[in-house]
Image (cartoon, rainbow, N blue to C red):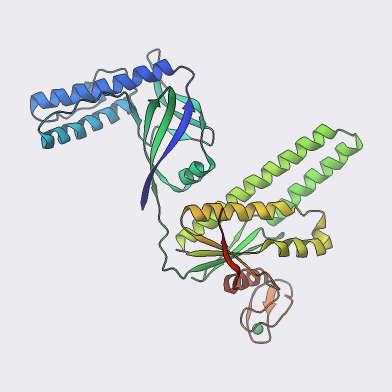
Amino acid sequence: MQCLTVKIRFFPEDPKILRQLGKEYVRVVNQLTEQADRLGAFPKMTTKHVESLLPSAVCNQAIRDAKSVFRKSKKLGSRPVLKKPVYFINNQNYSISENTIAFPIVVNGYTRKTTFRAMTTNRDWEWLKVAKMGLMRIVEKAGKWYAQIALEIPTNVSNGETIMGIDLGLKVPAVAVTSTGKTRFFGKGRQNKYIRRKYEHRRRNLGKLKKLSAICKLGNKEQRWMKDQNHKISRQIVNMAIQEGIATIRLERLENIRKTARTSRKNKRNLHRWTFYQLQQFISYKANLVGICVEEVNPAYTSQTCPACGEKNKAIDRRYECLCGFNTHRDRVGAINIMHQPVTDGHSLSA
Ligand SMILES: [Zn+2]
């Protein structure tokens, strides 16, 4: 487990309210520790016993904070007094998206979970998706507002030798095979095809009507859909790699996918080369964040070569069979070979 903090800038429309709540939070903590100091112990209490302008979830956090400040003060022999306004929200009460954060504040005497526009970097967003989120701390620094979130990142535990081979394709977007003996298929190839065909059909219809801007819009929509799919698939792949304790992910060097896809006339229309590239970038990026190495391998004949003896065979139906006795599902062969391929140029991909 690795701990770190991400700092997300956000933009409150009315910073006065937040400033006031920050002061109130500090006031409550100081008041409760002072009270405990007088009593010589921290009394049992709930938010009902505390008069404050804070949302009850935040008030609860203030009580917890006061308790720990009091404990510290007993050790130190003197009571620390908080001065800087601050506001804490526990992970049950805030939420984050790629461009917003939401947490409870009090407006006109009512608690409202309020959404703020926020700027989350891609990197932070990827961390947030794999991490266990802890407390959120709201602070103002030089007129700018930040939400700091404590994260616990699962560390990839591997013996350094476990490998995952990934074969990207049109029919099945991604096949992963691991040296721990697992195989998984990712994404829905047919659905991809269906969606692309649907958009293509619409594009053609619009083309007849010469509605250029509508065609562009449609293109963007399709791209967004593909991007979303790639994000999902790459996330699932990296999650599987974490689960299996994979040290290294091996991917095919991309030129080959382009070449084979180009020669396959049947898929020519449906092909969007860049989506492979994008998926590979997403996998590398997400894998690197959790310390998994990503390597590119020589892609020659990967889907036809027998992983056991090196003979070339074509699969019949869904079955790949070799005279040497090796046989498996057709779609696994590529990934198995990628897993065993030597690394090209000796360098690994990093996003
Ligand atoms: Zn063989």
- At x 52% / y 39%, what residue is drawn? 121
228 relative position to 287: left or right = right
Closest to the observer: 75 or 199?
A: 75
Picture layout, residue 52 above or below residue 233: above
Q: Nearer the viewer, residue 261 or 110?
A: 261
> In screen coordinates, is 17 left or right of 218?
left
| Residue at the image position 61 percent from the left and 53 percent from the top | 281
Residue farthest toward the right in the current orientation of the protein? 208
* Total tally of numbered discs in the picture: 0
Image position of 297 (left or right of 152):
right
Q: Residue at x 46, y 60 (%)?
A: 243
Front residue of 91/316: it is 91
Q: What is the x, y in percent for residue 274?
A: 71, 52
Residue sitting farthest toward the bottom: 324
- Image coordinates of residue 16 in percent, x first then y, are 41, 15
Q: Is residue 27 above or below residue 240?
A: above
Residue drawn at (40%, 53%) of the image: 154
Q: Quadrant of ligand 1?
A: bottom right
